[in-house]
Amino acid sequence: MNIRQLVIVFLMGLCLLGKGGELCATEKEDRNYHEFEIWHKLLEYDLSPDGEWGMWRIQYAMGIDSLHICHLRSGKEYKYASASMAVFAANSRWIAFSMPGNHDVSAGVAYQTCLLDLGSGTEKIFKGAESFSFTKDSHYLVLKGRAEKAMELNLYHLEKKFIKTIANINSYVLDPTHQYLAYLCRSAGSDESHLEIINLSDFCTIFPEIEQATYENLKWDTWGLTLVRVCADSIPAHRNRDIKVLRNIGGKLRHYSLSEDMKNNLPENMKVSEFYTPRWSADGKVLFFGLTSKAQIKSAGPKVAVDIWHWRDGEVQSRQKDRYYENRMKAFLCAWWPEEKRWKQVIDTTFSGVAAIAPNGDYVLAVDDKPYRPHYREAHRDWYLVHTVTGQRILLLENTILSLSFSREGKYVYYFKDKNWWAYHIARGKLINLTDQLPEELSDAYYDGPIDIAPSFGVAGWLTGDKEFWCYDEYDIWSIDPVTLKTKRLTQGREQGIVFRSMQRGNPTIDKEFLLRVKGRDGQTGVFRYDPKGQHQQLLYGPYSYSRLVKAGAKGGYLFAREDNITSSELFYTDKEFRVVRSVVSTQRQSDSLRFRKSELIHYRNSRGQELQGALYYPVNYQEGQQYPMIVHLYELLSHRLNVFTHPSARETYNMMNFVLQGYFVFQPDIRYEINHPGESAADCVIAAVQEVLKRGDIDSMRLGLLGHSWGAYQTAYIISQTPMFAAAVAGAPLTNMVSMYNSIYWENGRSNQEMFETGQARFRLPWWEIGEEYVKNSPIFQAQSIQTPLLMSFGTDDRAVDWRQGLELYITMRRLGKPCILLAYKGEGHTIGLLENMLDQTSRVMDYFNYYLKGERPKSWILEGKKYSLEN
């Protein structure tokens, strides 16, 4: 049986509800169960600039993905299999996208570009074109692709339908206006290139007088065309770089060279870094680049393969290894003023790195953590404000874990400290408490992590000119004038129990289309349009999860997607004012056939009196008056996913919908933690949550299962040591011994797990030798004698996050205690199972396990007897 058949069999099996495989649906419905094969998801979507056309992609579980292009008024639609990366032209007449070409087994899948004329429906295929872009005036489609052994550039005129080919190119870039196109043209039989620039209005070619060489990082922005020349050196690792800038292209060309301005002042054994991409200040006066040390060339000789783990190491060897190339790529920040023909090294070995550059380029924020190494907990450091011209250094904060940022225009440095937002006025050298007069708390009262400082609720940013600073409390957005300190509450969410947040990325730009995302206490979400007078307009609101809003050009109109736990993603189109909202496409057909019922929010309290919520999902074909088994699925906070649609998947063992389709209630309770008591906190919250949900009467208290992966698996293994209420438990990659886990390595990044324990998810604020009793009390392995629940664990033997030996420890202990425990060990797999065969196997075994213990179905032999070792395993 092949993989495709296995998936189909598994998905069909999800529909065999009830004991003994009895069907709890009609024969007519059973005949449609093969449609599980085509469960599909809505992927990216977009609008043409004029709002007339929409495009979206659909992903199928086992089929071929498809691109859909639809005229939104007439319904005329084009559909393409396996197409992606669709882009509309600015005039909305054309759309281009990538699609596979002929399949060559030796070379993989060759891609090509398809151009569709939306007016006539005419298609044109450009074979071998792997990337493309439209010019802003919609005159050209620029295509880059492989021709024989070299890359070529094709300029296709959309109206006149002629094509200009430029052979042997390395890279190309359009200027910001798309009037010019620059490209590096490779010389035959050489790695060297020369620069050419074409005027797209008349195809006149400009040949700048710069030498033929090896170039990289071709970039064109408002401040000019920049490229980096690789200088010759017999030792590749020692090759220097020369940054070149060209300005006033099309007029009297101005050419600048960093190497000429450096002359002979480059520090010994240093070079311009190839890993630091040059970047301009906001005014285009300063170009920042990096200097790095030349790599030392070690003499040839016998090598001894030994790592020395020294107790004084700033970072453990595994972390040094993981960050080796990252550290090699670090550079000392430098500034170059091309018009003034001077440069300066801004940062030296005094600092550990640069955190931010002011927009105008006058200052940088530099950090130094060297005095506080090694870091066993949070990384402490000193923060300095460094003037790029004078080199003046101002110590802003010392020995802190806080983060600092520049304001929008760079007039202030701001940060959150002592439950307030602070701003350092750079010109005046004055520190200002921006939020001292605000009546509401700005730090997250729900924070239950191990770090002593509770984080803020966040910021929306700074308005133009740094005239206002916008920050959040639990519900609302506040505006503060940094000069007068006058405050204003911009939203009225607290009274309504609704959280308001900006939808814009970065600093807010206030216009008629400034949108706010909202979420109510009851889990409903939506979108409001901001009004400076406080009369914010409700555009969308309801018990749904809304995806990205895509806006057309100046004419307005939006595309957005909506779903809830019952209804899969549906794409909608609306006019600018959201007066008429209509469906464009739905992925709901399959879920209708399964008659999904409902989900609801359950409210409960833990022993500390904290109000918590849990998401409860009803089994398919639920009938009032009957009792059903229930799976409790754990992590930390999961109730926010109440209105998110989950597609069933044989690839996802911990997929909630898989169990819903098998006739289970699924409950996902939220968990809040007390520091140094992670397991006890989880047990406290989960037991209280289950006791509350059992009051309903439609859940069989004798048929409860517990399920979790990773941190959720740890809590699963711990909770069954504290209560006998669960009939079966499944834990995927659980932590079981908090002492041995503390003293191990998180191989995903080479860090010691001590950091994760004392500053992260494990929530132990102190090491095990200081609070050993808490480590033991919260370790499943030290509580194993109390376990009465059959446990199934699953691990990948190459798990780099939680070593699979954590599972072995608990397995060996429970085996010695004579308690039912099974460990699935997937050879070569990591923290999550990757091979499709293994995904299907794990999903099937977990379902079989629960079906046996919670439904009384006939057990598979491996549950009762295991499986003998074989060389063929």
Image (cartoon, grey):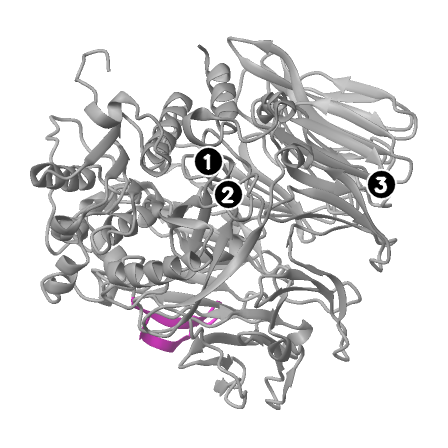
Quadrant where the N terminus is found in the figure? top left
Say which amino acid is labelled 3: Asp
Foreground disc of the pair 3, 2: 3
Residue at the spot 59% in from the left edge and 60% down from the top edge: 281
Magenta-drawn stretch, dominant element (helix, strand or loop): strand
The residue indicated by pointer 1 is: 231
Alpha-carbon span between mark 3 and mark 2? 34 Å
For the residue pair 12 and 195, the one nearer the viewer reads as 12
The residue indicated by pointer 2 is: 242
The region drawn magenta spans 380-400
Q: Residues within 10 Å of mark 2 (few under 14, many from 20)?
A: some
Is residue 589 shown above or below 372? Answer: above
Does the CB distance between marks 2 and 1 fall below 8 Å? yes
Q: Residues within 10 Å of mark 3 (few under 14, many from 20)?
A: few
Q: Residue furthest front?
A: 625
Quadrant where the C terminus is found in the figure? top left
Instruction: Answer with left or right where residue 434 lies relative to residue 533.
Output: left
For the residue pair 57 and 808, the one nearer the viewer reads as 808
* Residue 381 shown in magenta: yes
Say which amino acid is labelled 1: Cys
Determine if residue 270 is in view.
yes
Is residue 280 shown above or below 516? Answer: above
Which mark is first along the chain, 1 or 3? 3
The disc at residue 389 is none
Alpha-carbon span between mark 2 and mark 1? 7 Å
Foreground disc of the pair 3, 1: 3
- The x, y position of residue 27, in whole percent, is 61, 23
For the residue pair 406 and 733, the one nearer the viewer reads as 733
The residue indicated by pointer 3 is: 137
Which mark is first along the chain, 1 or 2? 1
